[in-house]
Image (cartoon, grey):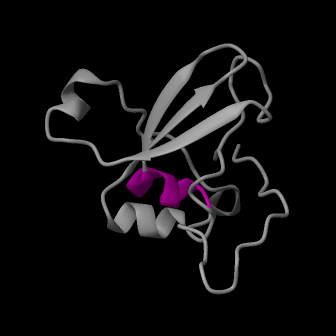
Amino acid sequence: MPVGIPPVRAHPGKPFHTLRDAAREGQAIAVRCNLCRRKSVFLAVDLIEVCDPMRPAHIAPFACSRCQTAEFMDVKLVVPRPGDLVRRRVWRNVRWQRPDQE
């Protein structure tokens, strides 16, 4: 399940980079738990199907599946080069559904 968005506000003249923006630019979301050192990479195109597309991209979309906490999550936006997706495991949403589509 996606983690709730913490109450953070952007500067009015400089809005947050959203998941929709990241998907439009072809970015991947690299998430790392600093507590258990688990790493995951998600394509932003896949995350907008599960999460709110207007969600800020710098906030972790999920809690760590091993630690069950979102406190220690570190998020980086990366633009994958053509060979990166072959060598790196990218988690794709095969069976995920939004809660309102059940």
| In the image: residue 21, left or right of residue 83 | right
What is the total number of numbered labels drawn onto the structure image? 0
Answer with the quarter of the image where residue 16 lies: bottom right
Q: Residue furthest bottom?
A: 13
| In the image: residue 55, left or right of residue 27 | right
> Which residue does the image show at 39% across and 62% down from the upper left?
23
> Which residue does the image show at 80% across and 34% down from the upper left?
71
Q: Position of residue 89 (x, y in %)?
A: 35, 24
Query: Between residues 91 and 9, which one lies in front from this camera angle?
Result: 9
Whether residue 49 is in magenta: the answer is yes
| In the image: residue 89, left or right of residue 50 | left
Q: Residue furthest top?
A: 36
> Which residue does the image show at 69% across and 27% down from the upper left?
64
| In the image: residue 90, left or right of residue 12 | left
Q: Position of residue 12 (x, y in %)?
A: 69, 85
Task: Look at the picture and state if 24 lies above or below 29.
Answer: below
Q: Position of residue 42 (x, y in %)?
A: 44, 40
Whether residue 72 is in magenta: the answer is no
Q: Position of residue 24 (x, y in %)?
A: 34, 68
> Which residue does the image show at 77% across and 58% down from the upper left?
5
Magenta: main secondary structure: helix
Task: Look at the picture and state if 91 lies above or below 11.
Answer: above
Query: Between residues 40 and 102, which one lies in front from this camera angle?
Result: 40
Task: Look at the picture and state if 19 lies above or below 93.
Answer: below
Q: Residue furthest right?
A: 7
Q: Quadrant of the C terminus?
A: bottom right
Task: Look at the picture and state if 60 lies above or below 50.
Answer: above
Q: Quadrant of the N terminus?
A: top right
The boundaries of the magenta stretch are: 44-51
